[in-house]
Structure formats: C-alpha cells, structure tokens
Image (cartoon, rainbow, N blue to C red):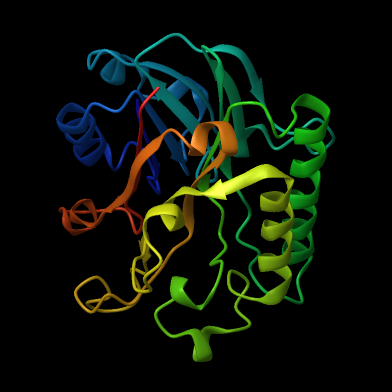
Amino acid sequence: MKVATFNANSLRSRLHIVLPWVGANQPDILCIQETKVQDHEFPIDVIAETGYQTIFCGEKKYNGVAILSRCELNDIVFGLDDEPKDPARLICARLESTWILNTYIPQGRARDSEMFAYKLRWFERLKIFLNRRFTPTDRILWMGDFNVARDERDVYDPKRLWGHVCYCQEVQDVLQDLMDWGFIDLFRQFCEEPGHYTFWDYRMPRALQQNLGWRLDYIMATQSVAIKAMACQIDTKARAFEKPSDHTFLVAEFDF
C-alpha cells in the first residue's frame, strides 16, 4: 500500500500538479490539506476521471481537507468531537482495517495571539478525539500539515528560527504528547539526517534551490502499521513544478 500527503494551498490551482502526480505515482490514499474550496465547487468530477473516490470538507479561501482513495472509505468523520468542530481541518475514515486521519492543524500566527493558544488547544483536543475513538493498538495512519518542526533537523536555520509559532517548545511538546500516545514519525524511521524538508516559503527567493525549508508535513503511524513500512520519502521534484504549492508530497509505502 502506498499513501501520501500534500498541502495543496488551493486544490483548484494545483490540479495541474495533483492529477499528473496521482497518475504517475498511483497512491492508494492521498490526503490533501488547504484545498481552499467550498464543497459545491470541489472538482470531484475531474478527480473521479482518474479513478479515485474522494471525500472532502472545505470552505472558501481557507482550510479544507480531502482524501482521495482507490478503494471505498467507511465510517467517515469530519471534524473534532467538541465545538468548534473545525470539519474543514480533519477527516477520519476507515480503509478496511486501517484508519486514515487527515489533519490541517492551525498555523498559529503569533505566539502572543489567540490563534496560537487555539493551536495548542487543537492538539490537546485531537488527543481527546483519539482517546474517545481509538487505542494505540489500532491501525492508524495520521497524515497532514501539522505546522510543527519537531527538532533542529527540521528547519534550515534552527538558531535564528527558534521561537517561531511552528518551531518552539510549546508546539514541540504538544506534538510529542500525541506521539507518546502511540505514534511513530515514519520519515524519521528511515532518515535521521537534517536538511530534508516539505515546505519552502514563497516569500524567500530561491528558497527551494538553496534548500531553505521546513519539515511541517508528516505521516505518523501506530506501531502495528509502522512495522509494515517499507519506505517514507519526500518528493522534492513537485515543489519545482510550474505554479507549485509551497509544500510538496510526502509518501510512505507498506507491505501489508
């Protein structure tokens, strides 16, 4: 089985990337974040032509999550259990015996802002969601844009960037708390080296060429899934396409 995650930063603006990539790579599951499209405008017919089923929840200009699947998805849930549910930030669904969790976690804006406090609470509420519905022994793949760089290997300039809303002690702690619940960072299972990123800021000239990036996108797995992983890789080529997202695809393969 092959799965992937991708922050599209407007799906309709990246169809020229997503559709060929799906055709060439044939993932069984593709989780997409920041679709930035209302449900009645979602390009479901175009995607269906590729042979994929799609579940999605979006809103105008902001947020939005979707899962493309080659097989039927069941027991679909949109959003957290408590208010505000944020359905355009979370989809959970079952693919046979494996649960797929796709999240677009708030960025946080500034550390002294209410949005940053909301970001920290979001992680805490996600743990409550997991505790209500699952146990760490379940087969779960948690994917998406987490807006967290786990450690100094995951940012291009760790000293200067320390304290950013995506790279500070508070966000690292809440992510680690969820990992302690029962998740393994699959990319780090295969690669311990620094300098591997999934996001390069548009606002920085030649950020990709100079590899001035961040690792903000993840594929996490519970132990029963992680032991079946064969590879987890970042597809940097997609970031160099014409009119790209500021993120790229992260891909994992399993032997089930």
Judged left or right of residue 150, residue 212 is: left
Residue drawn at 26 percent across, 19 percent down:
46
Q: Is residue 231 above or below residue 54?
A: below
Q: Nearer the viewer, residue 109 or 250?
A: 250
Judged left or right of residue 195, residue 113 is: right
The percent position of residue 11, horizontal first and vertical second, equals: 36, 38
Q: Residue furthest front?
A: 227
Residue 141: name its quadrant: top right
Q: Nearer the viewer, residue 144 or 43?
A: 144
The percent position of residue 16, horizontal first and vertical second, equals: 19, 38
The percent position of residue 86, horizontal first and vertical second, equals: 70, 37
Residue 242 makes an appearance in the image: yes
Q: Is residue 76 above or below residue 221?
A: above
**Quadrant of image for the N terminus:** top left
Residue drawn at 39 percent across, 11 percent down:
71
Judged left or right of residue 30, residue 207 is: left
Q: Is residue 3 above or below residue 109?
A: above
Residue 35 makes an appearance in the image: no
**Quadrant of image for the C terminus:** top left
Residue 166: name its quadrant: bottom right
Residue drawn at 15 percent across, 31 percent down:
24
The percent position of residue 134, horizontal first and vertical second, equals: 74, 27
